[in-house]
Image: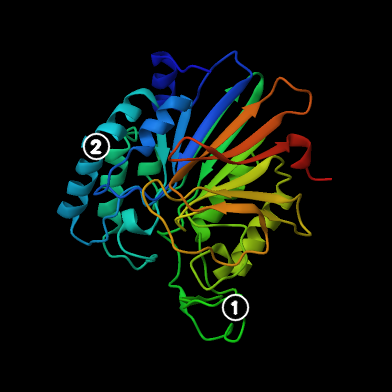
Amino acid sequence: MKITSLFLFCLCVSNFIFTQDSSITIAFGSCSNQDKPLPIFSVLAKHKPDLFIYLGDNIYADTDRMSKMRRKYRKLSKNKDFRLFREKTPIIATWDDHDYGQNDIGRHYTKKEQSKKIFLRFFKEPKKSERRKHAGIYTSYMYPLAGKTIQIILLDNRTFRDDLLPYNGSLKGDSTHSYEMDYSAYLSEDSTLLGAEQWRWLETELRKKADIRIIGSSTQFATEYNGYETWANFPHEQKRMLKLVQATQANGVFFISGDVHYSELSLLENPYTYPIYDLTASGLTEKWGFVAPNKFRVGKPVMQNHFGMITIDFKMEDPEIKLEVWDILDSLRMVQIVRLSELRLR
């Protein structure tokens, strides 16, 4: 599908793409340090995606000085590879900690309102957008395609999130966790990741009519607890998400995520919904030295710089969702075919 200037106008004003085609390609990624080369965007451009989703750490600001944050966004905007890609490809985005403000920080970041204004300006959010009227930057988009509807929900995992609990030594002696862990999981339910306001909004969104729902989360949703930052640090919130999908009868849900500086596909079997996929693409410029344990991982992780791709094809009776990961050398490193019938409540 080729998006014309008319489609781009529609995307900016009303969040809709109108097309007679039966397929769409959506690329996504996270963790792009503006101070490093960004050839990954030239590789991305070769695939001509219809849309790109930034999942956070879009810059590495790590500051409470807004002048410094603006300078870093300007540096990203002037990068030739990024600039040429942005000229031809619509981009939507949420944030994670480093572009929100500081490493692993949540609701207590004192400059979150100022940071939000800079973020929305950089990503050219319309002045009348609902995103500008509520706290945080959560938002959603509807894309009609071949008589069907794709919903993209971008969560805000920073503005409302309680502080993470320091690691309490609960996994000591476990040979699978042979690294220094940072955080423990909350055992009580009087803590939050998304916050009451965002949860109410999300329930409304999941009750809207849509055939496929892509939920963008800056941190991984479907992994096990591993001592790092993940939804598993808030297991009651993870469970709440699954039960909300069940309660709203929201079919077609899968997650995309970032943050960890490598790629992996997770599959969370649970008693409330169909199996929930979570494809992590994290490493447009960043890398990590090892992979944290994850019993829900499908296949092998990708440690090189990379991006994720989603191709949705409605021309089949049972529509196909193709999940891919491509690396910096433009090599296909991961592919998983999911049929829409697999993402359906029974």
Q: Which residue is mark 2?
A: 79
Residue located at (50% from left, 59% from top): 194
Front residue of this view, candidates 147 and 320: 320
Q: Is residue 124 left or right of residue 262?
A: left
Q: What x and y, as percent, mark residue 114?
A: 25, 53
Is residue 210 visible in the rendered structure shown here? no
Find the distance from the CA under tag 2 to the CA under tag 1. Answer: 45 Å
Secondary structure type for disc 2:
loop
User: What's under tag 1, amino acid-wise?
Assistant: Ser
Secondary structure type for disc 1:
loop
Location of residue 40 (image quadrant): top left
Front residue of this view, candidates 334 and 122: 334
Location of residue 254 (image quadrant): top right
Is residue 55 visible in the rendered structure shown here? yes
Q: Is residue 217 left or right of residue 334?
A: left
Among all residues in the image, which is located at the extreme right? Answer: 346
Q: What x and y, as percent, mark residue 294?
A: 62, 64
* Rendered image: mark on residue 188: 1
* Rendered image: mark on residue 280: none
Among all residues in the image, which is located at the extreme left? Answer: 67
Residue located at (21% from left, 52% from top): 69
Q: Does residue 145 sit above or below 219 in this rendering?
A: above
Q: What x and y, as percent, mark residue 190?
A: 55, 74
User: What's under tag 2, amino acid-wise?
Assistant: Asn
Q: Residues within 10 Å of mark 2 (few under 14, many from 20)?
A: some
Of mark 2 and mark 1, the one earlier in the sequence is: 2
Q: Is residue 120 left or right of residue 2?
A: left
Instruction: Tell me the quadrant of the picture where the C terminus can be found.
Output: top right
Q: What x and y, as percent, mark residue 275?
A: 74, 51
Q: Residues within 10 Å of mark 1 (few under 14, many from 20)?
A: few
Residue located at (57% from left, 53% from top): 301
